[in-house]
Amino acid sequence: MSTVTQPSVPENLKSFLSAPKKLLIGGQWVDAKSGKTFDVYDPATDQVVAQAAEGDAADVELAVAAARKAFDSGAWSKMTASQRSRIIWKIGDLIEDNADELAAMETIDNGKPIGVAKAADVALAADMFRYMAGWATKIEGNTIPLNVPYVPGGQFHAYTLKEPVGVVGQIIPWNFPLLMAAWKLGPALATGCTIVLKPAEQTPLSAIRLGELCHEAGLPDGVVNIITGFGETAGAAIAAHDDVDKVAFTGSTEVGKIIIKAAAGNLKKVTLELGGKSPNVIYDDADIETAIAGAADAIFFNQGQVCSAGSRLFVQSGIYDEVVAGVSEIASNMKVGSGFDASTQMGPLVSREQFDRVSGYLKAGLDAGAEASAGGAAIDQPGYFVQPTVLKNASPEMSVVQEEIFGPVVAAMPFTSDTEIACQANDTTYGLAAGIWTRDISKAHKLARQVKAGTVWVNCYSIFDAALPFGGYKQSGWGREMGHAALENYLQTKSVCVSL
Ligand code: ADP
Ligand code: MG
């Protein structure tokens, strides 16, 4: 059975936590104009550990003006690409140099196990900046031969220029605070944009530290501005601002739809990385041991607070009982506790709100007739801990099967035939990711094509890389992050046509 251990905060983090947290605007660290601050909680203890400046529309106004000034000055966009590349690379180096501190920040802010924060969040964030540093020098247009039927004998020299879109607003979630900042900042910086970044109110700490590291790396003032604060105030002001040329958002589908409406005022460009309810399909010819471990990891990684989590587990009927028993055994034996305890496998959920939300889904699922073969309840202990949960006897109409829970709860369902599974897998409004486990490569590739999802993992799950595009079909979003696809989000194409 799950056990809970008490956390202990590393000494070196304490001074950062007690120092005043400010907004980064035009290269200066300043208080919110209102003078307000908000509480930052340790999710393992439900205790306030820091205060952050509560930026709102007035501060967003100043940050957008600073980003505009920096963009128009050309200090960043007109710097040689090689110099820009070196600064972005340096940000990656500084993240790595400060890996222990950043990992501890993620653990106290988000709750995740510190080993995971260091090996995944921090390492991937450093890698993202380095990957995008490489692209800064490789952004090129084309020369294009023209025909122009109505100008007989005309000769033209036509080409495209790739130009930065301008001032971008970036609004990010709390599940991978530093990494989401890196996914957003990396391509925007590589293309020469300037930025107003808003971390989630639940997890402002690592973005503040990243702002310091950006300046240490030599980023000119006003290129990255950081506004900590709430979504309905600071976030809404960024999405609606007429002098913001593009908004990039990662978060709930519900807020994604609000962002689109807010962006309509000046028709700013929009990219969205939203929710998911991803199918994870295990065929009876899979390596079952590996698939069981993979299915558990697909849902329990990061306490299940992953937009691409494998939350709908489809198992071919002949091996259904065996797989459900295997995943349930892993869930029941998981060590749940403080992310600072080295033996912890799963930490608390991020917030009281998230704890209530996940607890509500557990109750709704059990009331509707699903049966918990592992977990099924919150853990009665300070902090936002819930048990890793496997639900069986779940049917397609239940909220635990249709809606994104964003917690460590998987619904396991049997399937019989190849033809049936593609329909079942796609029976959701989302389309972010999918998993397929089989030894039959033909079957794997066929289902990979049928599944409506932006990422398909075969015989693995949650493999992320700075080079691999990530994003959603259907209501999981617009556009792709990472890979060179991400650069397009931050570029305009200008066609230049010269008569010779
Ligand atoms: P959750 O409900 O799980 O916290 P959200 O989608 O609400 O997820 O939050 C993701 C990010 O969006 C956070 O940075 C949050 O502050 C921001 N946000 C929330 N509401 C709005 C809004 N109305 N406009 C702009 N940003 C918002
Ligand atoms: Mg919300």
Image (tube, rainbow, N blue to C red):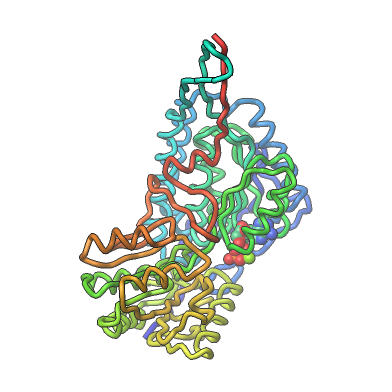
Any part of residue 176 in sight: yes
Quarter of image, res 416: bottom left
Quarter of the image where the N terminus is located: bottom left
Q: Position of residue 291 (x, y in %)?
A: 27, 71
**Frontmost residue, 122 versus 453:** 453
Q: Is residue 80 above or below residue 69?
A: above
Q: Position of residue 348 (x, y in %)?
A: 48, 73
Q: Position of residue 458 (x, y in %)?
A: 30, 61
Any part of residue 40 in sight: no
Q: Residue at x 55, y 34 (%)?
A: 219
Q: Is residue 421 above or below residue 478?
A: below
The number of callouts visible is: 0
**Frontmost residue, 321 versus 248:** 321
Q: Position of residue 271 (x, y in %)?
A: 57, 49
**Frontmost residue, 497 versus 362:** 497
Q: Farthest residue in the top direction? A: 500
Q: Is residue 369 left or right of residue 295?
A: right
Q: Residue at x 41, y 87 (%)?
A: 393
